[in-house]
Amino acid sequence: MERWDEWPQVHAELQRAYFSYSKLIHVVLFSDQWSPLAGSMSALVTRVRSTVTVPVFLVDTAKYFNAAMELGVSATPALVFFHHGKPVRIQRCGWEQDTKCEF
């Protein structure tokens, strides 16, 4: 069974990483409990997080929708990486232009 983390505690951990100048990568999986695909990813992350040295968190997107939106999560499951307590943006060149519809 997955152990879901509460966003306020995850956010506090990220703040500690920021103020302690931690170079450790933190990983947050934003996922939904109702989605079969997201459920599979949640189960995988639950199995993996006990074997890795980096902190890995599992957050319910429906419960913490505003936090997910602030971080740019538009579909789940979504992995968000944090370095030094700040989100790392990984983006394909031209994505903003390629995904717009012009008439």
Image (cartoon, rainbow, N blue to C red):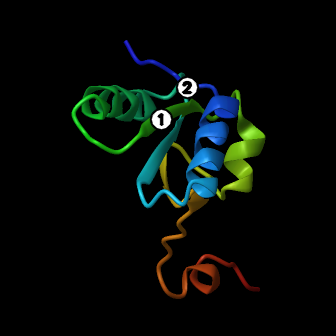
Residue at figure coordinates x 40%, y 30% from the top left: 42
Classify 98 as above or below 2: below
Dividing the picture into quadrants, the one containing residue 89 is bottom right
Q: Is residue 24 left or right of residue 89?
A: left
Image mark count:
2
Q: Using the rendered image of the protein, determine whether residue 98 is visible from the camera's viewpoint.
A: yes
Q: Could you say whether the residue bearing mark 1 is in a helix, strand or loop?
A: strand
What residue is pinned by disc 1? 57
Mark 2 to mark 1 CA distance (whole Å):
6 Å
Residue type at tag 1 = Phe
Residue at figure coordinates x 50%, y 75% from the top left: 91
Residue type at tag 2 = Asp
Q: Is residue 99 left or right of residue 44?
A: right
Q: Using the rendered image of the protein, determine whether residue 77 is visible from the camera's viewpoint.
A: no
* Outermost residue toward the top in this view: 1
x, y percentage for residue 31? Answer: 52, 35
x, y percentage for residue 16? Answer: 61, 46
Determine whether label 2 and label 1 are within 8 Å by CB: yes
Numbered circle sitting on residue 18: none
Q: Alpha-carbon neighbours of circle 1 within 10 Å: few (<14), some, or many (≥20)?
A: many
Q: Could you say whether the residue bearing mark 2 is in a helix, strand or loop?
A: loop
x, y percentage for residue 15? Answer: 65, 48
Q: Alpha-carbon neighbours of circle 2 within 10 Å: few (<14), some, or many (≥20)?
A: some
Q: Is residue 28 left or right of residue 42?
A: right
Mark 2 or mark 1, earlier in chain: 2
Dividing the picture into quadrants, the one containing residue 65 is top right
What residue is pinned by disc 2? 5
Q: Of 66 and 40, which appears nearest the observer?
A: 66
Residue at figure coordinates x 41%, y 27% from the top left: 39
Q: Quadrant of the N terminus?
A: top left
Dividing the picture into quadrants, the one containing residue 66 is top right
